[in-house]
Amino acid sequence: MSGGERHTVPVDVHLIAVREGQKGPEVLLSRRAGTVYAAGHWHFPSGHVDGPFEDVVTALVRETYEETGLVVEPDDVRAAVTVHHRAPAGGGARVGFFFEVRRWSGTPDVKEPKVCDTVDWFAFDALPEPMVAYCRAGLEAYRAGVPIAVHFQEPGDTIGHDPAVDRLRLVPAPGGGEPRPAREVREFAERAVGRITAWTDVSWARTASRVWRAQNASGGVWFVKIHQNARFHGREVAALREWVPGLGSAGPRLVAADATLRAIVLTAVEGRPLHGMVLPSDEERQVFRAIGELAARIHASPLPAAAPGTAPVVPHAKVERHLEGARPHLRPGDEEYVRSVVDSAVRLPPVDAVVTHGDLQLRNLLRADDGTLRVFDFERSETQSAVRDLVRLLDHFEGRKDLYEAFFDGYGRPLTEDERARLLVETALDAVSGIAFGSKTGDPELVERGRRTLLRCRAGAAARASRTIDGGDPR
């Protein structure tokens, strides 16, 4: 070791208590008061390890109860991030252990009024000011998913968080544990929106595309996406440039694109995903009417100059490829049924091609506080028959005539007879495609959804729904 005295530092513990609020995750903060350091600033409930014989988990449990009255069991404590911090104005260094807790007993309250005058819950994207810079650094490192961070402030820095002064350095995990995109993607994004201080991986588990939520030093939020192939990249960029701007606030805005990296930077759009949202029946009907209205707006978008005037016939080569991948999971007779349905497409007259989203389903729709819808993820957008955007909504109409009617009320018209016939073709093809893809990627839910759809088609449910699009009972 180098010469001189052995370096010793204080050890802190910090509580990151997280609950689900009406607008997403919320974190518990307390406001320091009296004559303590950083009085008037918001901070996590926290404290020091009490002597050489107290471990950090025990210290967290104790400090949490002493400051807030919450009772936390040691088994419910989860490691969040460790921060090596140096205070401004020549302050010494210290090590802080930040812990996530999502289970406790009791209601948070002020238990030490001499050092804290209030406690409250705040959404991650609506944090109060002023906030201790050390605490804010720990929260950003936690959200970025790194195990360790360094936050060494300089003399002259303020105690409170200053978006213009970024002292946080994230230390990623070894191997494949880096929570951020590769260096060249980070540089591309920062050229577009400035220094990014927090990266959060928000990718869907079942897709090869990667998506990060990026926040810069001024608090602005964007999304950075890397497409799994050049075709998807080209489709999404074309949609974002050509027709998505016509949706106004219902869609994101393209900030930057790089074809070599297959990366894009998008503005954030307001709302919570409809996927998994539980709503009363009357609100569900309002949502599906709004989905119908949004679909109609998409399909009314001007066609690109080079777009075909009619929707293409389903290529048989694609069908054979999907059947090959799905065959181990098909029931007896499924393959023959799919072939017969797809063969029938050749005999269908051409239908007008329109701009389509290509993957219109609840996971790609957001609902804002005022009830309006937002749509994202355009990597499968292409000019196709309008029914392509109905395929992945059909599950929600099973046994729910009210949702079916609400959607088409919003859409503004029934489907034509030719569109109804094509809908059955697209549904069968999408089912077998989902089975093949789910089998390849180890997604049993996707496989079962495809099997369930084929069963419903063969039982005649989808055909009956198609025949009654103009107002009958779809069940």
Image (spheres, rainbow, N blue to C red):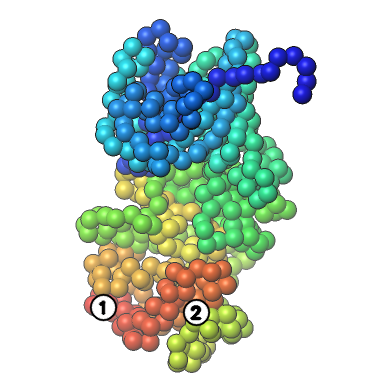
- What residue is rendered at 46% in x and 13% in y? 38
**Can residue 129 be seen here?**
no
- What residue is rendered at 29% in x and 20% in y? 111
Which disc is residue 18 wearing? none
Mark 2 Cα within 10 Å, few/some/many (few <14, many 20+)? many
Q: Which image quadrant: the N terminus? A: top right
Q: Horizontal and vertical percent for residue 94?
A: 58, 21
With 275 as the anchor, is 304 left or right in this view?
Answer: right
- What residue is rendered at 22% in x and 59% in y? 281
Q: Are marks 2 and 1 in contact (CB under 8 Å)?
A: no
Q: Secondary structure at mark 1?
A: loop
What residue is pinned by disc 1?
475
Which disc is residue 432 wearing? 2
Where, by quadrant of the figure, is residue 303 drawn? Answer: bottom right
Three-letter amino acid code at disc 1? Arg
Q: Is residue 291 above or below residue 272?
A: below
Q: Horizontal and vertical percent for residue 50?
A: 46, 21
Q: Which image quadrant: the C terminus? A: bottom left
Q: Is residue 55 above or below residue 384?
A: above
Q: Nearer the viewer, mark 2 or mark 1?
A: 2
Three-letter amino acid code at disc 2? Val
Mark 1 Cα within 10 Å, few/some/many (few <14, many 20+)? some
Where, by quadrant of the figure, is residue 386 drawn? Answer: bottom left
- Relative depth, front residue between 181 and 230: 181
With 256 as the anchor, is 250 left or right in this view?
Answer: left
**Can residue 90 be seen here?**
yes
- What residue is rendered at 59% in x and 19% in y? 9
